[in-house]
Image (tube, grey):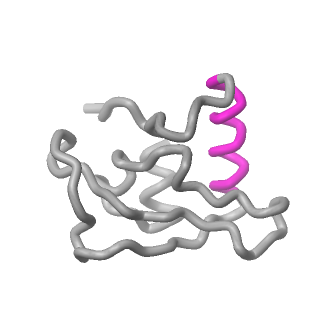
């Protein structure tokens, strides 16, 4: 999942690990071009949450492929709450 966030959306590692479900704007459907990820935090070294490296919030386009992957994961996890992180740990 982390690899897809970094490759498909161009996120930095710390941004990917700071994402919560509330940061996903799904759009009406897979063809809605307004779908995006809202990047407002990053996790430095996987521990400390703070501003992204660029210092400001940004919107990143959400591809159809990544939207499908995230939606499937959201359903698989039983539709977790908005404040739950997408990624709970870093793989070595």
Asked if the magenta segment contains residue 90, the reply would be no
Q: Residue at x 63, y 55 (%)?
A: 66
Could you say where residue 88 lies in the image, as x and y percent from the top left?
A: 38, 31
Identify the magenta region: 65-77
Q: How many marks?
A: 0
Q: Residue at x 54, y 63 (%)?
A: 37
State whether the magenta stretch is mostly helix, strand or loop: helix
Could you say where residue 63 lies in the image, as x and y percent from the top left?
A: 66, 65
Q: Quadrant of the C terminus?
A: top left
- 61 displayed left or right of 5: right
Q: Is residue 21 above or below residue 14?
A: above
Q: Is residue 43 above or below residue 76?
A: below
Q: Residue at x 57, y 33 (%)?
A: 81
Q: Is residue 83 above or below residue 54?
A: above
- 29 displayed left or right of 70: right
Could you say where residue 84 lies in the image, as x and y percent from the top left?
A: 47, 34
Q: Residue at x 42, y 37 (%)?
A: 87
Could you say where residue 70 lies in the image, as x and y percent from the top left?
A: 63, 45
Q: Is residue 91 above or below residue 15?
A: above
Residue 15 location, quadrant? bottom left
Asked if the magenta segment contains residue 67, the reply would be yes
Residue 27 location, quadrant? bottom right
């Amino acid at each position: 999942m982390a690899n897809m966030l970094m490759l498909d959306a161009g996120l930095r590692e710390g941004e990917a690990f700071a994402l919560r479900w509330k940061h996903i704007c799904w759009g009406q459907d897979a063809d809605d071009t307004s779908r995006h990820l809202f990047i407002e935090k990053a996790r430095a070294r996987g521990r400390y949450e703070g501003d992204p490296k660029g210092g400001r919030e940004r919107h990143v386009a959400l591809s159809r492929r990544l939207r499908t992957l995230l939606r499937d994961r959201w359903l698989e996890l039983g539709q977790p709450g908005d404040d739950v992180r997408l990624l709970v740990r870093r793989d070595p």
